[in-house]
Amino acid sequence: MKTKSRLLILFPVILSFFVMGFVDVVGIATNYIKADFGLSDSVANLFPSMVFLWFLLLSVPTSLLMNRIGCRKTVLLSVAITAVALLLPLIDYSLGMMLISFSLLGIGNTLIQVSLNPLLANIVNGDKLASSLTLGQLMKAIASFLGPVIAGWMLLHFGNWLYLFPCFLIVALLVAIWLSAVSIEEQKEEKKSSFVQCFSLLSDKFILLLFLGIVCHVGMDVGINMTLPKILMERTGIELSEAGYASSTYFLFRTVGCFAGVLILAQCSSRKFFLISIACLLFGLGGLLFFDNKALLYASIVLVGLGNSNIFSIIFSQALLHKPSKKNEISGLMIMGISGGAVFPFFMGLLSDMMTAQLGAVLLLCAGAFYMIYVGMKMRE
């Protein structure tokens, strides 16, 4: 009975990771917005920056808010903000409204990224945390995979990719209702933390290493999501409606990788699996650098998706287990690293415009992957 009760609590928390995955719609949405409004790469790439900038500004304040109102209430607040973000494009599809929508999506996703992982840590034992976080990332990857598929299907059958938003809106509301109906016992921290105390954790070299790892990983993830359709269009001459499936392929194999990771991490060293994943990622990025053939490019996308599927959960679990008594503050700092999703696309857009090719963007992705090798070498077993 106790196991059944735990599962009833765990299900809405894991499904909340699906809502977390809504943020990845910015990749395919940016490509549609660029085409609809005739924007350059550097200007179009400002849209995801509007999403991920909020991770830099609000992650630590969210961890302090979470100490006051609890993880579950913070997750519910994030879902409400996300719902508003999904509603706005249906009211007015304009550049200004999309900037507001993306900003609210970033605010809502900051809240859920900071609060959802510690909420899960209140339910799952420490020795199973890495695999449980990977299961959550699997749910997030499924949402990320479905975004481009639903957008393309809506465009093909109804002439408007924006109909993706009400589909996600309905799911968000259902998750909010279920999560609000369960009661979760949360561990209270005896001493409230301040901004200074949160940022002082970066003086720990291992925490700083992992924080910069999150910056690189998320920056690469967002950059890959945005750049893959452009690479396919540039190298093979196909249209955006078809090239958008490159992002879906990436997220499909991220999903496959997450599913495999749930099983492998229960048996294998996190460090060893991390290094294998980075090797797979580098081989895939090498293919994106040199191949022009459509089949070979898709094979490279498969490798990139598999390689990038478990990086976040391994880094995050290493950070939480390093200082479990400071899990809320650690979560805030790690999620602040998601602001890398604002930094990488901006510079990738500049390099692409300077080189008049997506080669510049892929070179920056490779630089991030090499740093991840360094993170893996310093990681603990």
Image (cartoon, helix red, strand yellow):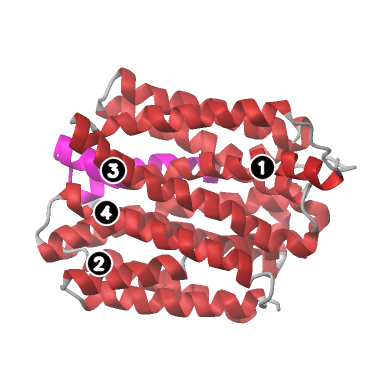
349 or 294, nearer to the observer: 294
275 or 264, nearer to the observer: 264
Q: Which mark is residue 360?
A: 2
Q: Amino acid at mark 3?
A: Thr
Q: Residues within 10 Å of mark 3 (few under 14, many from 20)?
A: many
N-terminal of the two: label 1 or label 3?
A: 1
Q: Residues within 10 Å of mark 2 (few under 14, many from 20)?
A: some
Task: Decide whether residue 43 is among the magenta residues.
Answer: yes
- Picture layout, residue 4 above or below residue 161: below
- Between marks 2 and 4 in the image, the one whose residue lies nearer the viewer: 4
* Residue marked by disc 3: 30
N-terminal of the two: label 2 or label 4?
A: 4
Q: Residues within 10 Å of mark 4 (few under 14, many from 20)?
A: many
- Between marks 2 and 1 in the image, the one whose residue lies nearer the viewer: 1
Question: Which stretch did the figure color magenta?
Answer: 28-56
Secondary element under disc 2, as helix, strand or loop, is helix
Expressed as whole percent of the image width and height from the top left, the position of residue 186 reads: 82, 40
- Judged from this view, the residue extending furthest toward the right is 190
* Quadrant in the picture for residue 157: top left
- Between marks 4 and 1 in the image, the one whose residue lies nearer the viewer: 1
User: Number of numbered discs present?
Assistant: 4
* Residue marked by disc 1: 11
* Residue marked by disc 4: 245
Q: Are marks 1 and 3 in contact (CB under 8 Å)?
A: no
Q: Is residue 247 left or right of residue 117?
A: left
Q: CA distance from mark 3 to mark 2?
A: 19 Å
Q: Is residue 194 left or right of residue 176?
A: right
Q: CA distance from mark 4 to mark 1?
A: 29 Å
Question: Could you tell me if residue 349 is visible in this image?
Answer: no
Q: Amino acid at mark 2?
A: Gly
